[in-house]
Image (cartoon, grey):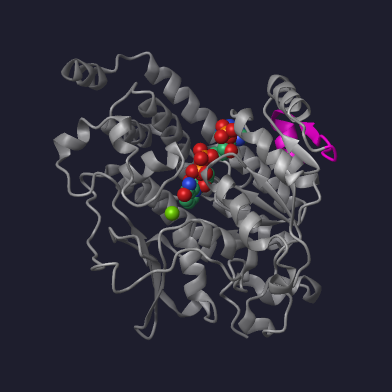
Amino acid sequence: MSVATDVRMHDAAAMPPERNRALPDVARGLGGVAPIGMNIAVLGATGSIGTQTLDVVRNCLRGRELVCGAGEVRVVAMSGFSDMEKFAPLVREFSPEVVWVPDGTAAAELSGRLSGGNTHASLSIPEILTGDGGLVAIASECSADVVVNALVGGAGLAPTLAAIGAGKDIALANKETLVTAGELVMGLAREKNVRISPIDSEHSAIWQCLQGSDIVEVEKILLTASGGPFRGRGREEIAAATARDALKHPNWSMGAKITIDSATLMNKGLELIEAMHLFNQPPDKVEILVHPQSIIHSMVQFIDGSVVSQMGLPDMRLPILYALSAPRRVATEYPRLDFLACGDLTFEPPDMEKFPCLALARHAAATCGTLPAVMNFINEWAVGQFLQEKIGFYEISDIISEAFGIYNVKTVTSIADIREAEEWASEFLETRKARPAVVHAKRKCEEA
Ligand code: NDP
Ligand code: MG
């Protein structure tokens, strides 16, 4: 039986039959029940992916049980972080059983907003959890069947592991989870027989291209990249770029961190590592191809030379919906791709010299062990600094490169190895911070 098309299919033969509900159509017949969960948790509900997930639930899934074949879809848990003004109306609309906010201050603000502005007599205030432990608890102990992880950065790892440990399926946007601890996460997912459905558009595309095929027949994955806002620009111009310049993505509207990652091409590097883990491929079988129109979301080349691609308008609601409904399709009224109007589809190799983050990520992907975790930690910090205009564009890659030069990579056997690597990265940054930021000071003078 060819069942390599699901991201956890490497050891499908070992699956107990009663947990085979997530097998693709080819493996279990079209009459099977779609693997959509009735109850959904949305972690990072106020963010770009979080709000689009809620839009998908609101417009495509709620009240559509006949299409999905799995009963009513409910949002039972949600998390917000810094923006209670945005979070409160979402909580009011979806009425989850439990929510998470970072601390007591945010909890007081949220409950004040919920009770103060309560024009719905029937609204019940949900249980509010706080703190790191609360985020792990909401991911693992709520009544969700599927946890949508739309958190940004390293904060996403612990809740993902907790949710998998509790046997919940994961719809994963938080790529940092797999970059940091891909082997542990995928290993636990296999052990617990939970499905990890990618939300990242490229990985959703690859997953869709693989439906009906066996993973051993894959010759290579062609991971497409828009090239970001600085594609084709000169190195000096890129070096002088500000956060405002880098936040102008040509095709996608996303959260700030991933938009900067797209400008440095670190995003594509993170996605390379994400693809390796999701589809069990070595890094040299993942080729990166710049495709500025973002119409082909990725492709798979098979051993017979045939290439399958997945296309569509750049709209994250589509991979989000597919992550929740796969392998079934749900009707939508979202805009359609018009081939006669979309213009030429072009391709070019990535410029590794102008975008050194991509070369660094390739190195981390090939080295594996704790190096991707160190890279991810430093990148997250450096992107934050760049957003605050404290460092320049190329300092992001310079700092990562400096760390790579002195770090002794370890094998990952447990989460403790990841935490130790992150502690090393944190200490490295502390030591480094003591030194003057010469490049940035120069840039500031020029701007003035
Ligand atoms: P956003 O910054 O828009 O949203 C992040 C969410 O996480 C918000 O709800 C935010 O809360 C919350 N959050 C931020 N920091 C913390 C923290 N320390 N602890 C708990 N919650 C926190 O990010 P995106 O939606 O753009 O991205 C989310 C993930 O999805 C990232 O890993 C990204 O790489 C990935 N992704 C995103 C795509 C996109 O189109 N946006 C495409 C593909 C992947 P608040 O807003 O209240 O501060
Ligand atoms: Mg992507």
Q: Please give the name of the residue rendered at 36% of the width and 35% of the height, measured from the top-left corner.
A: 400
Image quarter of residue 254: top left
Compared with 371, 423 (above or below) is above
Say left or right for 134 vs 271. Answer: right
| Residue nearer the viewer, 421 or 398 | 398
| Residue nearer the viewer, 426 or 411 | 426
| Residue nearer the viewer, 165 or 417 | 165
Image location of residue 127, percent across then percent down: 82, 35
Q: Is residue 124 magenta?
A: yes
Image location of residue 147, percent across then percent down: 68, 52
Find the magenta span and give its range: 121-137
The quadrant the N terminus occupies is bottom right
| Residue nearer the viewer, 44 or 63 | 63
**Picture mark count:** 0
Asked if one can make out residue 299 in the rendered structure from this viewpoint, the answer is yes
Q: Is residue 396 magenta?
A: no
Say left or right for 237 vs 262. Answer: left
Compared with 63, 405 (above or below) is above
Say left or right for 176 vs 227. Answer: right
The quadrant the C terminus occupies is top left
Image quarter of residue 285: bottom left
Asked if one can make out residue 139 in the rendered structure from this viewpoint, the answer is no
Q: Please give the name of the residue rendered at 49% of the width and 78% of the height, measured from the top-left corner.
A: 216
Image location of residue 210, percent across then percent down: 50, 75
Say left or right for 260 vs 352. Answer: right
Image location of residue 174, percent across then percent down: 55, 47
